[in-house]
Image (cartoon, grey):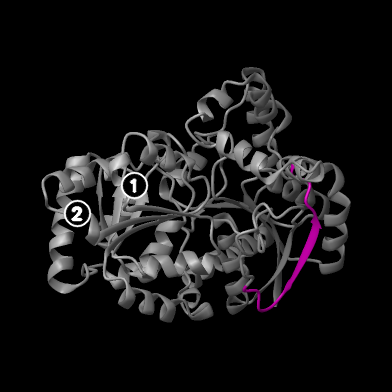
Amino acid sequence: MKKALILTYWYPPKNVIGAVRLTKFAKFLPESGWEPIVVTVNPLTDRYTRSGPLRDDLRIGVVYRVKDRSLNEIFYWLYSKIKLSGRALKKTESKSSKGSARVLEENRLIKFYRQVICFPDESWLWLIFGTREVSRIIEKERPDLIFSSSLPNTAHWMASLMSRKYKIPWVADFRDLWTQNPYLERVQFLKGLEERLERRVMSRASAMTTVSEGLQQELRSRYSQQVFVIPNGFDRDDLQAGGVKNSALRANTENPKFIITLTGTIYSEKSDPSALFEALLLLLRERELSKSEIEVRFYGRKQEFVRSLIDGKFQELKEIVKLFGEVPREQALEAQLQSTILLLLVWTDLRAQGVYTGKVFEYLAAEKPILSIGPPGGVLETLLARTKAGLQATESNKVATILKHWLGEFRTYGKVPFEGDHAEIEKYSRRGQTKMLAEVFEYVLQDTKVK
């Protein structure tokens, strides 16, 4: 069995969506003849595990853990060590993620940290202190290929160094872009330097993978290497883990309400539920809906923006909007299955139209109609049209029309029928995506031999 060294910052037990892609690759690669050798970090704090760890599905292979040298984690750890009270810490986090985020972003000290100190990202200390550790792992395991995934982009930098040192082919995976990332902010004098750094680092890559056709086009415009699209996906095994499906069925029997659920992080002023809230108010005032028959549930990190909307402009919806905060992944999956429809908030920045959210693929597996709210024309709208798994709307009146129709079906059938194209949806299974990745690996090895 050939060996693939996987360099990634995000990996279980860190409970974030970026880690899911890598753990599923590691789970299914052996089915295609590749043994995963994962090199990741040992969590320094409970910042990404306090709601429950992400389960590692590794069946064959090994996981090596180096010290977590992310600046964000180090500062979080320091806060804990100086015994910053939980109340003060929560207050600090909420200030950085709700309506006052604009004030913080204008703060010169925070801008200096994000745009200058975190260059190229908050994990650059890994290059200084982790290179020797990674070298020892490579010398011990002798992998046939290196596979790195970003963000953070330091993973690619480390992979480039190792590829050059040991003459091992390297495939770079972009869950998000580097300098082309629409949400990367960098002070002017460092922009050009980072672009040159990216070109120098990525010139060593044998091939690249990314999650959508839009990002593929952007990468092709900058690089001569082959760029393959391997979207995110879903693993149906997750719905059986811990009795997720049985628990959800019991909950559905106990709570016959029309339930709208969003699982995932809310980014203030980037993913905005206001159109949904306006639509609900319209239906309530037109007596097309009663508060007793509906519930809107939010699960995930950074819910302060939603709370500010409910405490302010949409106080009338306080009875029906429930904020559950960050929960274990199994609970989030249960919540999806307990729902009548699932809510997806597309980022409002048009520059992000080529970006999928990993959650949409979990939604596909749940087989519940998806209501997507955001600007038209992006890859998410195309995905929903292709799979027939849901509808997208931008304006509140269109959202209200969709909800009114679905409410009618719910009152008639006790559910909203899912009309997705199952054959098309199955194309996004994690097993299938990993088979595609293994084919990329084989292509790269063959291409390397030819050269």
Can you give x and y, in whole percent of width and height, for residue 425 in the image?
A: 34, 68
- Using the image as rendered, state which of residue 25 and residue 68 is in the foreground: 68
Res. 296 image quadrant: bottom left
Can see residue 376? no
Can you give x and y, in whole percent of width and height, for residue 389 in the image?
A: 28, 62
Report if residue 61 lies within the magenta region. Answer: yes
Tag 1's secondary structure?
Answer: loop
- Decide: is 30 above or below 173: below
Residue range of the region highlighted in magenta in the rendering: 57-70
* Disc number for residue 318: 1
- Decide: is 229 above or below 35: above
Res. 185 image quadrant: top right
Number of numbered callouts drawn: 2
* Disc number for residue 343: none
- Decide: is 86 above or below 39: above
Tag 2's secondary structure?
Answer: helix
Q: Mark 1 is on which residue type?
A: Lys
- Using the image as rendered, state which of residue 131 and residue 172 is in the foreground: 131
Can see residue 445? yes
Residue depth check, mark 2 versus mark 1: number of the one nearer the observer = 1
- Residue located at (39% from left, 38% from top): 311
Q: Mark 2 is on which residue type?
A: Leu
The residue indicated by pointer 2 is: 403
- Decide: is 432 above or below 148: below
- Residue located at (53% from left, 65% from top): 329
Res. 116 image quadrant: top right
- Residue located at (22% from left, 41% from top): 396
Can you give x and y, in whole percent of width and height, for residue 442 in the image?
A: 60, 67
Q: Quadrant of the C terminus?
A: bottom right
Can you give x and y, in whole percent of width and height, for residue 154 in the image?
A: 71, 44
- Using the image as rendered, state which of residue 276 and residue 82 is in the foreground: 82
